[in-house]
Image: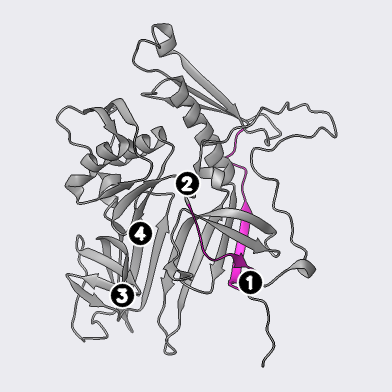
Amino acid sequence: MEVRVGGTVHSGFIDASVTLTMDALANDFQLTYSDRWVESGEPLPIEAGDAVQILIDGEVVLDGYADHPEIDVQADKKALTVSGRSKAGDLVDCAVIHPSGTWRNQTVGQIASEVCEPFGILVTVFDDIVRIPRVSLEDGEGAEALIMRLARMRGLVVFSIGGDLVMSRAGAERTKTPLWRGANIIGGKRSSDHSQRFSEYHFHGQTRGSDTVTGQNSTQLHHKVDDTEMRRYRPMLVVAGGAGGSDDLGVRAILERNQRLGRSERIVVDVDSWFDDDLLWTPNKLVEVHDYELRVDADLIVSTVRYQHSPTSEGKGNSVSLEMTYPQAYSAERDVPLRPRGRRRGQIVERIFPAPFTPLIPGDFRPLVPATEDP
């Protein structure tokens, strides 16, 4: 791992971590380094606002800015740390300045590119052919909120690659490398949390009148979806300002449910290489996971990749962890019939998501690379 500051590449630092995620518009990094770069012996403090690039194997994995430099001086040591975000951090913080605040007959990609252009951010959109008749800024809406709303209209996920944005379908690609306990999985953990799941999601909103939505129908929109796996009554009400009609409310309600359901299962595994075959691990890819210790036997989506670099005298210290969940957590394309809560014993019910992970029987475990005898 290397750091490029002011056009100069350095690798002489104490510790570095980079997080790439689908769960935030901007990726982040943190560096710890001495007051003099090990390679050159020159002092090079990283100041707030400096342009910083993080490179792995010559590839820029994060292109952004230093936000929070800090100097820690103790009796026996002096250390400097700095954290920052990719360029999309400015989209998170800033407003959209537009002459009219309205776009007409443009695609999601065209609008997002216009919003991001002043920040020096390029936007790549997959499956971007549908023109939207009208999009208007909502009161107090910032750049991130607008971009996420545009993505929701088209059922896309948004995340940073390097310093730019990608808007894509969830899990549009599959990794080349399956993950197996005992082969390339060297550790991991799995946790469940239902505290943020609800049995019913009620979305209320209103929209401008049109030829098809008029009068009372435009001001009293309502959509409801159920999480049929929640056994007790737990309703959630969301007032969705600026709704684009009943269909838009429906998508938002399903997304809310799916995100909360999917993220209630958190699986994190540590793998033995920064690379998926010959490519770096990146978010938004489907991966085949077999881990009998964590009771995982499923296709999951990589939501977050964390690279850690802690150089040692032996030249080791590189690690990567992958946080994963159900692919449906980022999609509104799947819904199922509602399940009656007072169901009879023995009634067969279709689940919203796949059944809980089926434990793998250790005796049936197959390593990723079959063992071979020495010639």
Q: What's the residue type where badge 4 is placed?
A: Asp
Secondary structure under the numbered disc 4 in the rendered image: strand
Quarter of the image for the C terminus: give it. bottom right
Q: What's the residue type where badge 1 is placed?
A: Leu
Residue at (23% x, 45% y) in the render: 116
Q: Residue furthest front?
A: 375
What are the residue bounds of the magenta stretch?
173-198
Q: In x, y percent, where is residue 212? A: 40, 11
Residue linked to disc 1: 368
Q: In x, y percent, where is residue 143? A: 27, 40
Q: Nearer the viewer, mark 3 or mark 1?
A: 1
Q: Earlier in the sequence, mark 3 or mark 1?
A: 3
Residue linked to disc 4: 28
- Residue 2, label in figure: 3
Q: What's the residue type where badge 2 is placed?
A: Ala
The answer for how far apart the CA atoms under marks 3 and 1 are is 31 Å
- Residue 167, label in figure: none
Q: Earlier in the sequence, mark 4 or mark 1?
A: 4
Quarter of the image for the N terminus: give it. bottom left
Secondary structure under the numbered disc 2 in the rendered image: loop
- Residue 170, label in figure: 2
